Image: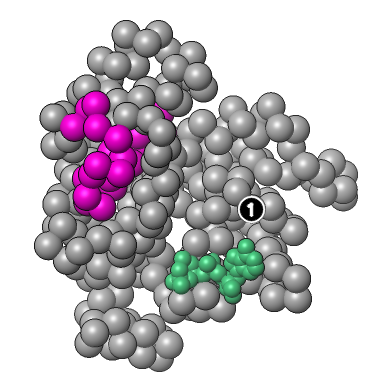
Amino acid sequence: MTAEPTTTPAIEFRDVVKRFGDNVVLDGLGFTVEQGDRVTLIGPSGSGKTTILRLLMTLEEADGGLILVDGDPYTHEYRGDKWVRIPEKRRSQIRRRVGMVFQQFNLFPNMTVLENITEGPIHVLGKSRAEAVRRAEELLDQVGMAEKRDAKPNQLSGGQQQRVAIARALAMDPEILLLDEVTSALDPEIVADVLGVLRQIADTTDITMLLVTHEMRFAREVSNRVLMFDQGRIVEEADPETMFTAPTHERTQAFLKAVLDR
Ligand SMILES: Nc1ncnc2c1ncn2[C@@H]1O[C@H](COP(=O)(O)OP(=O)(O)OP(=O)(O)O)[C@@H](O)[C@H]1O
Ligand SMILES: [Mg+2]
């Protein structure tokens, strides 16, 4: 027998509903991200991209449907036909598999660079301080920030802060890394540095990545799938080459024309 090996998706959204008041942002959204996939979400402002990542970080609560990580219902599950919340303890265990880097860095302002990175591994993962520091130094080296280990975030440029934020996310050994427009708050000449760091991570790890970016060239180089969103729905899904050179959907064509002409 030569059956295809079956693997559980790293991420699955199944009929996910998210509303803010009367605004239905996700209306029964379904998609999967396979293990080791690098998936880019593109789409107009307000289409729900950040909401998807925030749901995955449990920074937002869904109003319906299932979100699964490695096949485990993560936020809610059905018991019979009842949709019930997953207890916080199990939820936080699963959340440890997921890391996120935000547009606005969100470093802890009162901690040094090194402390920003070791905080989670020590207090959440229970690593020894020595082990956490060793790994943090390795990561700081990798993102080119070793010399700034004792600086405070407000002593760093935006690009430097973002590189620290990337190191901080990686220090938690995530299986899944979520990246939300991580270069859009940066000066143009710094963008390439940060993208270089991310490209290196993509090339040297098998971390599953789900990213939102307006850097279409980066999306093309790093991702193996692109999902085009509009109004909380996937209007088109393709490999980057096809998506960026020969999109079939009119909505995608108009969107890409607008962003690429900018
Ligand atoms: N905390 C919130 N309270 C109320 N409405 C919200 C909240 N967060 C998001 N929304 C609404 O949800 C919709 C989707 O927002 P979201 O931030 O996911 O869009 P996006 O695709 O990331 O857009 P952008 O490209 O501008 O970042 C928008 O209509 C937005 O106004
Ligand atoms: Mg957004």
The image quadrant that residue 148 belongs to is: top left
Q: Residue 125 location, x and y as percent? A: 48, 19
From the top left corner, tell me how far across and down residue 239 is, in percent.
Answer: 30, 66
The image quadrant in which ligand 1 is located = bottom right
Residue 43 appears in which quarter of the rendering? bottom left
Q: Is residue 252 visible?
A: yes
Magenta stretch: residue 143 in it? no
In the picture, measured across the screen, residue 6 lies left or right of residue 23, that is left
The percent coordinates of residue 226 (x first, y second) are 36, 66
Please name the residue shown 24% across and 84% down the image: 262
In the rendered structure, the answer to whether residue 142 lies left or right of residue 38 reads left
> Which residue is located at x 43 percent, y 87 percent?
251
| Front in this rendered view, residue 253 or 188 | 188
Circle 1 Cα neighbour tier, 10 Å, few/some/many (<14 / 14–19 / ≥20): few
The residue type indicated by label 1 comes to Glu
Instruction: Kindly tell me whether mark 1's CB lies below 8 Å from ligand 1.
Output: yes
Viewport quadrant of the N terminus: top left
> What range is drawn magenta here?
148-174
Q: Secondary structure at mark 1?
A: loop
Which residue sits at x=51%, y=31%? 96
Q: Main secondary structure of the magenta part?
A: helix
> Disc 1 marks which residue?
60
49 to 169, vertically: above or below: below
